[in-house]
Image (cartoon, rainbow, N blue to C red):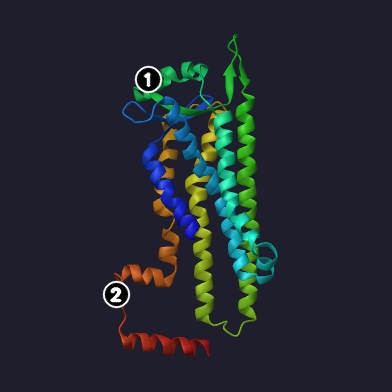
Amino acid sequence: MYYISGFEILYAILNAIVQGHIFSHGPACIFFRNFKHSYFGRAEGFYLLVAYCNSFGLSIALFGVHFIYRYGAVDNVFRKKFLGGKKLLLLFLLPIFYGIWWCLVVAICYRSSSKSDDFMRIPLLENYDTRVEDISYVIIWFYVANDEGILGPKWTTFIGVANLWFMVTSSLVCVIFFGIKCYRKITRALKHSKMSSYYARSIQKQLFQALVLQTLVPVVLMYVPFGVLYVFPMLNIEVGFISTFVTATIEVYPAVDPLPTMFIVDNFRKTILCGCKMPNKKEEVSEAQNRRQTVS
């Protein structure tokens, strides 16, 4: 959880610095920032965008790693065998590896060029009243017209997409596989536990529900919008300003992500709704007695 919280803080800071925008036109989509009133020039702005894209690659791996770690917390055999010692460090380094990997993919496969400048010049002027020379951008350009005006695939873009789908698929497989195993392990443990009271079951149920919803948040706010963003240009469908909704969903993600835990887990929810009201001694004694009676 500390790992994820630290990532979200850094992501929010980087998002405030970059202030990026997404725009789709025909078979291409760009992620850009205006550097006209910025300390960063066009070249520096490009690498700033690449660094921002690092957060997406890191987040993809982070969700899978989170479920692997959660399963290790409930299965001692798995934890000792696969997450002991330096193996745990390797698990935490995996998101960093994914982030660097995605940075390289973006820098190599989605780099802008003079040809892409000419392609995006008029659409940017018409929709944003912005000159292409005043922005830094990365471009996902699926089909390029040849001298005869016939569209042909830009293979570097499709190679980048193949890398993306491998990263997303590997992450989702970990989430689904270890999420199911974690649920079964907890359910089985509660059935054979002497502490299998309503209170214990309720806590485990709340934590698992929070974990599931906390996983659905990035799926809804990041994975699905990015998928839509790739699909329309790949099919050469003009969406224009509609693509800007992706920017909005990405920006609200850090604020929405902690909400499931805050409002599903009873203790957190009561603390928030009661304004951090401290219980008196009589209430503490009464609550402790009720718990003992429930357990017995």
Task: Name the residue tied to disc 1.
Answer: 131
**Left or right: where does residue 99 sit relative to residue 181?**
left
Examine the rendered structure and indicate whether residue 220 appears above or below residue 277. above
Of label 2 and label 1, which has the lower sequence position? 1
Mark sitting on residue 277:
2
Q: Quadrant of residue 99?
A: top right
Q: Residue furthest front?
A: 86
Q: CA distance from mark 2 to mark 1?
A: 55 Å
Residue 155 lies, in percent from the top left, at: 64, 25
- The residue type indicated by label 1 comes to Arg
Looking at the image, which residue is at 47% across and 51% down?
Answer: 7
**Left or right: where does residue 90 sit relative to residue 232?**
right
On the question of residue 224 being in view, the answer is no
Query: Counting other residues with Cα less than 10 Å from the Cα at mark 1, is it few (<14), some (14-19), or many (20 or more)?
Result: some
Residue 281 lies, in percent from the top left, at: 32, 87
Q: Which of 182 and 109 lies nearest the eye of the viewer? A: 109
Residue 146 lies, in percent from the top left, at: 60, 13
Residue 177 lies, in percent from the top left, at: 66, 58
Examine the rendered structure and indicate whether residue 31 appears above or below residue 179. above
On the question of residue 198 being in view, the answer is yes
Q: Quadrant of residue 174?
A: bottom right
